Amino acid sequence: MSEESNSSEENKLTRLNKFISNAGVTARRKADELIFTGRVTVNMQTVTEPGTKVNPDKDVVKVDGEKVRPLTEFIYVVLFKPRGYVTTTHDEKGRPTVMDLIGLNTRLYPIGRLDYDTDGVLLLTNDGEFSNMMMHPRHKVFKTYFAKLDKPIEEADMRKLREGIMIDGKPTSRAKVRIIPNTADQNIWISIHEGRNRQVRRMLEELGYMVQRLKRVEYARIGLDSLKPGEWRYMTEEELRDARKLATPKMPVFRKPEEAGEGGKKDKKGGKKKKKKDKKKKIKITDTAVEPSTGSDVLESISKELEDISEKISDTKE
């Protein structure tokens, strides 16, 4: 066999966990579990190493005895998950799942999870590679939540959230947190890029706050738009493209020191003093990035919801 043929064969090889994920069977991490537990075979041989290379054109890969076939079409869905639904494809307790809300004749898998009693944006797809991009902490794809607390949040506690909170002996990554303008100090936006179990609630509980209401309003800057609880839509091409950009590592930008103008003097760091003011402005803009792009619409719907809840409480008391 020629060197050219060997090179062509090698180019077709792909990691087993990636092949399973790209075929829409499950997300990459779950694919690793399937392989580790001996549920995957390659050409009738059980394989337990996720990094095993396979040739999609020649090798026969099976999961639990069912042949894995590469997908020809990827689907991306945005769902307004209501409270009272579990984020899984099947629930052993018989509770309603998010899959009950989507009537497509294809296998989709949730990207991450939303708690049973949390509602909001949930992304689903059969594209395992995209799912992995959105979920893996190293890509730092942020999810933004509206949280109503039982009491006003202290500035010192917001600083702690921005630095990281210890949960189960391990610090969380830095969160973005901001009090919602023109509302009580107990209403906040909070953004995280990790996906630990009930993470937002646990971070706030660790600081002594009870979360009375939690709603995810954005994932990778993808919002609900005009969706109502239980409704879904296809992700737009623009949303998909922008989400991929968010997950793509950014190359560092190196700037050459600017030469001083007439009579201008450089400071010790090689830049003009005027540049320091520009830098402060940039930092200020970054701090407000936690607020959703659809913030006003989201806040309006949440405010109406909170008003309805208050009215119901008042009616009950009377």
Image (cartoon, rainbow, N blue to C red):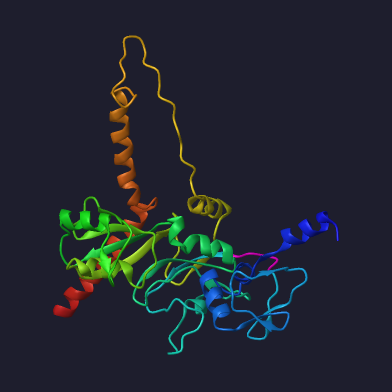
Question: Which residue reaches farthest top?
Answer: 262
Residue 69: x, y in percent? 70, 74
Q: Is residue 222 visible?
A: no
Q: Is residue 52 visible?
A: yes
Q: Nearer the viewer, residue 171 or 182?
A: 171
Q: For this view, does 95 lie left or right of residue 201?
A: right
The quadrant the N terminus occupies is bottom right
Number of labelled discs? Answer: 0
Residue 314: x, y in percent? 17, 74
The quadrant the C terminus occupies is bottom left
Q: Nearer the viewer, residue 261 or 32?
A: 32
Question: Which residue reaches farthest bottom?
Answer: 93
Residue 102 included in the magenta stretch of the image: no
Q: Nearer the viewer, residue 19 or 202?
A: 19
Residue 221: x, y in percent? 44, 54
Q: Nearer the viewer, residue 300 or 270?
A: 270
In the depicted structure, whether residue 275 falls above or below residue 230: above
Question: Which residue reaches farthest left?
Answer: 318
- Name the image quarter holding residue 152: bottom left
Residue extent of the magenta highlight: 71-75
- Name the image quarter holding residue 301: bottom left
The residue that appears at 58% across and 63% down in the rendered structure is 129
In the depicted structure, whether residue 258 falls above or below residue 216: above
In the depicted structure, whether residue 188 falls above or below residue 23: above
- Name the image quarter holding residue 195: bottom left
Instruction: Determine the main secondary structure of the stretch shown in magenta.
Output: loop
Residue 128: x, y in percent? 58, 67
In the depicted structure, whether residue 192 falls above or below residue 35: above
The residue that appears at 35% across and 59% down in the rendered structure is 192
The residue that appears at 59% across and 79% down in the rendered structure is 48
